[in-house]
Image (cartoon, helix red, strand yellow):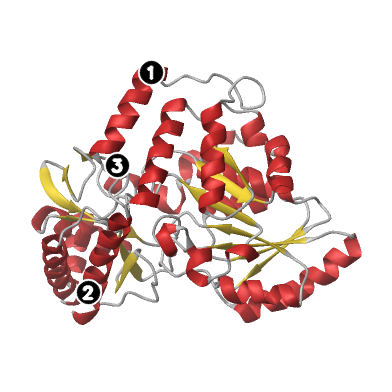
Amino acid sequence: MKDLFERIIKDKGPLGKWAKQAEGYYVFPKLEGPISNRMHFNGKKVITWSINDYLGLANHPEVLKVDGEAAAEHGMAYPMGARMMSGHTKYHEQLERECAEFVDKEAAYLVNFGYQGIVSAVDALVSKNDVIVYDMDTHACIIDGVRLHAGKRFVYKHNDVESLEKNLQRATKMATENNGGILVISEGVFGMRGEQGRLKEIAALKEKYNFRLLVDDAHGFGTLGEGGRGTGFEQGVQDDIDVYFATFAKSMAGIGAFFAADKDIIQYLQYNMRSQMFAKSLPMAMVKGALKRLDMIRTMPELKDKLWENVNALQSGLREAGFDLGTTQTCITPVFLKGDIPEAMAMVNDLRENYGVFCSIVVYPVIPKGLIILRLIPTATHTLQDVEETIEAFSGIRSKLEGGVYKRIAAAMVQ
């Protein structure tokens, strides 16, 4: 019999094998200073395009004031215990009511973390007789939730409605045989490439097939739709979303998340989501902070307007400069380039050290071999000067990449 750790020590995994070269710089980097458009990295001030602070609320003076007052009054422990036992307060209820009203659903349920919440909700919503049909590019939290499912699941090609319908036909047959139901899962905004989920076309299939729809709108909440109310409003199909999910970790610049649906469904989740039944309640400082952030989204449309001014300037400028941004329809701005992992590391080092631009790098196995995505997240705190400097920097690194400069640098580093 082998030692359990023998495999782990020998095989670090597709990303872990680069830990020696990458850790502390390419992965687990340390951005320092107040969260803003420009922060400190490796001793230098850089334009920061990797923070999901879409509306610039992280260090907004009004937000800091409420966060500080709530922490001073309650500390970070109150309320102690799980919601069902001793962790329930009127402020949790207030936030749930306001979230439900904002996204036009009957009721809402707070969860501590988006990832944990989605995993647990998927597990709770389906039984072994039910069938899950989900987009192949959904976030890891959805994939992990689906893995818990004891019944059948089918995956459809990314944003491919024809593939979805074929899988719905298979799911319908199986669910009928098992006396079960069907849960379809999509994202409102796919976080890597920035496309909106094809919610309108998915919802239209309800006329032919009997299924319920769960939408993870982590990146759409606060950025899309009238008043930032999400992708369902953007596409005019909010009523067709049976279970709506959004996180506070993006536009709300905080911690926590919520589900919104009909009252019966929310009550079921309250009594059956294991991640919440057996976990500490969301701390009061986070709850009061979220109430303030939600109020600002409702009453300060200029935040979303400024965000989109920056998005449009960045994306149009990059496209005019000849960059491939794929099919993004949202704030997420992926720049597609060709190269291997060592080239990508050399390029990002140059971008950060010599051009003063910090953005996230995405390589295999997240995307196919030979591709590099430099993923930019515009926020309301960015300026048009940030945009101009970044486009100039990207033009510079593209020339070096195409000229083989980074390949030579990478080869020399290996020797």
Q: Earlier in the sequence, mark 3 or mark 1?
A: 3
Residue at 10%, 45% in the rendered image: 44
Q: Amino acid at mark 3?
A: Ala
Residue at 21%, 46% in the rendered image: 36
Residue 89 can be seen, yes or no: yes
Quarter containing the C terminus:
bottom left
Q: Amino acid at mark 1?
A: Glu
Q: Circle 2 — which element?
A: helix
Determine which quarter of the picture holds residue 239: bottom right
Residue 5 can be seen, yes or no: no
Q: How far across and down, in percent of the image, does residue 40 sit? A: 15, 43
Q: Amino acid at mark 2?
A: Leu
**CA separation in Å, label 3 and label 2:** 27 Å
Q: How far across and down, in percent of the image, does residue 341 sit? A: 32, 62
Q: Earlier in the sequence, mark 1 or mark 2?
A: 1
Q: How far across and down, in percent of the image, does residue 327 sit? A: 40, 76
* Residue 58, numbered label: 3
Determine which quarter of the picture holds residue 35: top left
User: As drawn, is 79 to the left or to the right of 58?
Assistant: right
